[in-house]
Amino acid sequence: MLTTIKTVLANIGRGPATSRYPFVEETVPKGFRGKVTYDPSKCIGCKTCVHVCAGKAIKIDEKTDCFDFSVWDGTCTRCQMCENFCPTGAIKVTEEFHNAYLAEDVYKKAHFGNIPYIQCAECKKMIKPLPEVVAQEKLKGENIAYKERSYICPDCRRKAMAKDLMKGLAR
Amino acid sequence: MLGILKKPLRKMIAGSPWVYRMNTGSCNGCDVELATVALCPRYDTSRFGVKLSGSPKHADIVVITGPMTIRCKDAAYRIFSQIPEPKVVMTVGNCPISGNVFQDSYAVDPPISKHFPVDVSVAGCPPSPWAILDGFVKCIEIWENRIAEKLD
Amino acid sequence: MSKRVYFLPNICAGCEECLEACAREHQGNSLDYIEMVDLYPVPMRCFHCADAPCAQICPTKSIQVTEEGAVVSSSEKCIGCGSCLLVCPFGIPKVDTTKKLMRKCDLCIHRLKEGKIPSCVQNCSLKALQFGDVEEYEANKRKKAAAKLQRTGDSAL
């Protein structure tokens, strides 16, 4: 009998257990997997995320002078495989959990990104650019050879190197 | 005479929507989150007047989870037709929106909006209980408006 | 002091026997190129750079520099993202987007371990491709030039 009274008094002292959510802001534990965000300045268009997405939420649409990226919130399982496999860290999973929408709005909840191609300075073909951010982060040293040739496509780079070789060796 | 009573009547009727849960083939992840929201004192939806109802004939808010599996389509249509107007339909989870990971399966027929008219969708797999609470709050606003229309 | 494949200019006739030998050795497609510069054929393959930018940028660390000095990509770790093709100053890697793999000259590492020379060098019919130490070749050139200078007293070769 005494233990019951003690427990009851202790619980009254602790206050109500309910959290008054919509009127008070709540946070989720660290590491919670919420919505996905996308940074177009780091994307190289390798389509690894499209390959591993469990719910087929990611689409990359290659056009003639750019490619479009989209991820739809209504099918994203929040499995985090895209962030795990992205080579440059362009896709990240945030802790955003406010997901209740009116039914016609849920089809608009998608991230879009557009990455334009650059044009080869010699043959005018459209090539995918290597993002500046990625090059600065990963390449160490001067890398003059890459910087001189970063404006032309790989085929033209080979032709330029062949010309250089013949210039140095042939008489 | 009825005009003076409309405002307090509206508040009284809309103050306690009863919820009926329908599972059309879900993996039960979203149903487990619903159980914590509706029953657990931490989230406590009964402060909004929400209570789980045993029979579809007493339901005001219908909560649907799961992609519509072919096997339960008949039963789902039969039960949905017994829920009286006015009602608000809420779907919980990604499966009713698009089928999620089961999209290309021969046994499912998503989305639910093809079969029933949906008002509120809560995305996520499974959505956090805070998001389901947000969904309930949106449903209750729509519910009040529908009661007001009916009284007028 | 590591060995590379280098070519002697003005000897190559563009017969493409090296490309066929490379294809036979590597199950299907050849990993080398022959570029035409004003009617001269120039055989090209990976240069196996000492400070390879492809090895630095590879996100899965699939491209490594081995102890023989060759730059080799492992097919288990490669995800076919194409970063190495974007960063190579010479445009050498071949990226297969369906199989999601990158293939390039690997200096026939499996033949080097058995004591043989690379397949393209062995099959060159005109001996335009040589496999050896580039510094030895340059030292030989210097010796020949010094001998000629001594003989003729002529500074222009």
Image: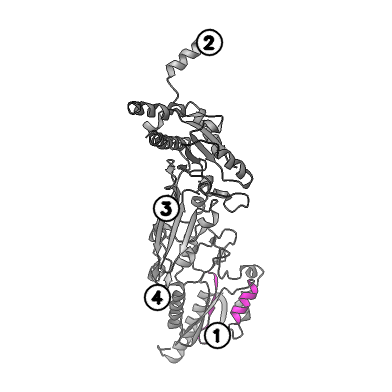
Q: CA distance from mark 1 to mark 3?
A: 51 Å
Marks 1, 2 in one chain: no
Question: Tag 2, which chain?
Answer: A
Q: Which residue is mark 4?
A: A124
Residue placed under numbered mark 2 in the picture: A3
What whole-number distance in Å separates the C-alpha atoms at marks 4 and 1?
28 Å
**Alpha-carbon neighbours of circle 3 within 10 Å: few (<14), some, or many (≥20)?**
some
| Position of A78 relative to C77 (above/below) | above
Residue A107 shows up from this direction: yes
Distance between the alpha carbons at the discs numbered 2 and 4: 85 Å
**Label 2 to label 3: alpha-carbon separation:** 57 Å
> Mark 2 is on which residue type?
Thr
Q: Mark 4 and mark 3, same subunit?
A: yes
Q: Nearer the viewer, mark 2 or mark 3?
A: 3
Choose the circle earlier in sequence order: 4 or 3.
3
Q: Secondary structure at mark 4?
A: loop
Does A91 sit left or right of B55 as displayed?
Answer: left
Residue identifier under label 1: C14
Q: Amino acid at mark 3?
A: His
Residue receiving disc 3: A111
Quarter of the figure with the C terminus of chain B: top left
